Image (spheres, rainbow, N blue to C red):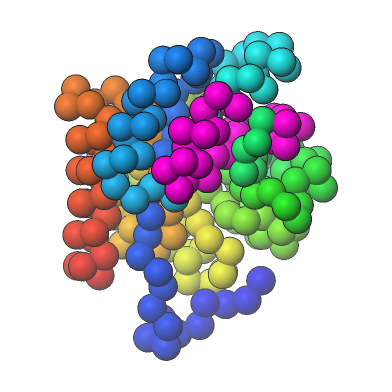
Amino acid sequence: MASRGNPTEARRPAPRLYLVTPQVSNPAGPREALAAALGAADVAAVLLRLAAADERTLTNCAKALAGVVQGKGAALIIDGHAELVARAGADGAHLTGIEEFEGAIAALKPDRIAGCGGLKTRHDAMLAGERGADYVMFGEPDNNERRPSFEAIVERVAWWAEVFETPCVGFAGHCEEIAPLAAAGADFVAAGAWIFDDARGPAAAVADAAQRLALAETAG
């Protein structure tokens, strides 16, 4: 991987939104919410988190939502389950931890996106980049909904953005974290289930998130 170089020499593209769904067991529920969210602003990708089920059910669920997501110009990324990506017509998989990533990348590359999160150390992040990750993600909650301090997440994003060309995703736990992650250099800002739980509805929540991203870019 190469250095980004002097930031005055080439301005990085404006950061984009990356939506993360709640766990989905039935595509009928989130289909409408996803369509509304994706129609409200520019969204680069959707990370689909699938509830535990048999392989056929998982595949059918992802396949049913692929058209909704891709029809709005966003990439559909499945959380784990790299073996389902091609059958479901998805664009790629998000793998958690360097071991899962290394075990799945051969099945995904070069035709599909291979993203990596759950990176506990800088060394793991660098390994993911060296192994061909299309992006690294910092700050997402673990299975117990625990995450590093926000200060540590911002620091990790800023370090990566300064040194490496591989895009990084900063995970925003709520709307107030969007602007600091963008300012730190995140190429994408992930918005979690709070987008879909917003009392205003997902369309309004995504529009708000997009506005915060735009303001952060203007301020930068």
Magenta stretch: residue 76 in it? Answer: yes
Number of marks in the rendered image:
0
* Residues shaded magenta: 62-87
Q: Is residue 106 visible?
A: yes
Q: Nearer the viewer, residue 83 or 217?
A: 83
Place of residue 100 in the rendered image (x, y in percent of width and height, measured from the top left): 73, 38
Quadrant of the rendering where the C terminus is positioned: bottom left
Q: Is residue 163 magenta?
A: no
- Quarter location, residue 38: top left
Residue found at x 72% / y 43%: 101
Left or right: 32 as drawn, with respect to 64 = left
Residue 56, image x, y percentages: 71, 15
* Quadrant including the N terminus: bottom right
Q: Which residue is the extreme one toward the bottom?
A: 9
Q: Is residue 171 left or right of residue 208?
A: right
- Decide whether the magenta segment is chiefly helix, strand or loop: helix
User: Residue drawn 73% across and 52% down?
Assistant: 111
For this view, does 103 lie left or right of residue 195?
Answer: right
Residue appearing at x 51%, y 13% in the figure:
26
User: Is residue 178 depicted above or below 164 in this figure?
Assistant: above
Camera-nearest residue between 216 and 50 = 50
Q: Is residue 10 left or right of residue 124?
A: left
Q: What x and y, as percent, mark residue 210?
A: 26, 49
- Is 105 situated above or below 205? below
Picture coordinates of residue 171, whole percent (x, y): 42, 43
User: Which residue is drawn at the image coordinates 55% and 24% (left, top)?
Assistant: 64
Q: Nearer the viewer, residue 130 or 106?
A: 106
Question: As rendered, which of 188 and 89 lies closer to the eye?
Answer: 89
- Looking at the image, can residue 154 be seen? no
